Amino acid sequence: MSEQKAPSGLPKWIFDHIELYKRDPEKAHLWDSSLGGSKGMLTTLLLTTKGRKSGNDISIPLIYSPHGSSFVVIASKGGAPDHPAWYKNLLANPECDLQVSTKAYKARARTAQGEERAKLWKQLQALYPPYDDYQKAAKGREIPVVVLDPIK
């Protein structure tokens, strides 16, 4: 993927996190979740997708949890009634790039379903309790649980 851009219309602290990930990925790996309504430091990765309309590489920092050799993220968009652009980009093109601390990966995204989704939702909700509030606010939208499988 080429030079990364940040999505427009996001809060400044997200842009700051993206820039920190580019400069110092080890430091950016841990994020102060009080900025998003929780408590404590959480692990984050930098996801880069191909824009489905623009064709540009677009980066976004996301809270994650490991799942075997994969990484799990939640497409919450803070409980908005529509999916985040990065998730729509993955639906159009599931291949993506990940920066997890100092390690870079090529990955393929898939949306968890059924029992796997329920288990992974619970795992991430334990890390970041606001996800339950986001689901309530999503007005009937089931928030996707996304598994990012590294490509070997």
Image: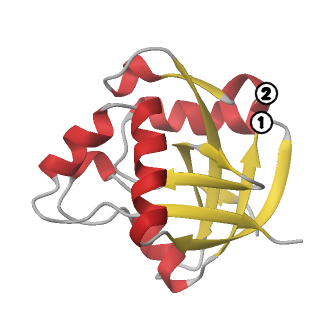
| Image point (46%, 41%), residue name | 124
Q: Quadrant of the C terminus?
A: bottom right
Asked where in the image residue 126 lies, by quadrant, the reply is: top left
Judge whether residue 36 can be spotted in this image.
yes
Name the residue furthest right: 152
Residue 80 - label: none
Which residue is tagged 2?
A: 26
Could you say which quadrant of the image residue 23 lies in? top right
Q: Secondary structure at mark 2?
A: helix
For badge 1, the amino acid type reads Ser
Residue at left 48%, top 14%?
40
Q: Is residue 42 left or right of residue 131?
A: right
63 left or right of 82? right
Disc marking residue 101: 1
Q: Specify the amino acid type for callout 2.
A: Glu
Residue shown at 43% from the left, 72% from the top = 113
Q: Is residue 78 left or right of residue 16?
A: left
The answer for how far apart the CA atoms under marks 1 and 2 are is 5 Å
Residue at 36%, 28% in the rendered image = 36
Q: Is residue 6 visible?
A: no
1 and 2 marks in contact (CB < 8 Å)? yes
Q: Would you place residue 36 above or below residue 56 in this image? A: above
Instruction: Give coordinates of residue 15: x percent, y percent.
Output: 51, 38
Crowd around label 1: few <14 · some 14–19 · many ≥20 (10 Å): some
* In-front residue for pair 21/68: 68
- Image quadrant for the N terminus? bottom right
Q: Earlier in the sequence, mark 1 or mark 2?
A: 2
Nearer to the camera, 120 or 95: 120
Q: Position of residue 82 (x, y in %)?
A: 23, 66
Colour pattern of the rendering: secondary structure
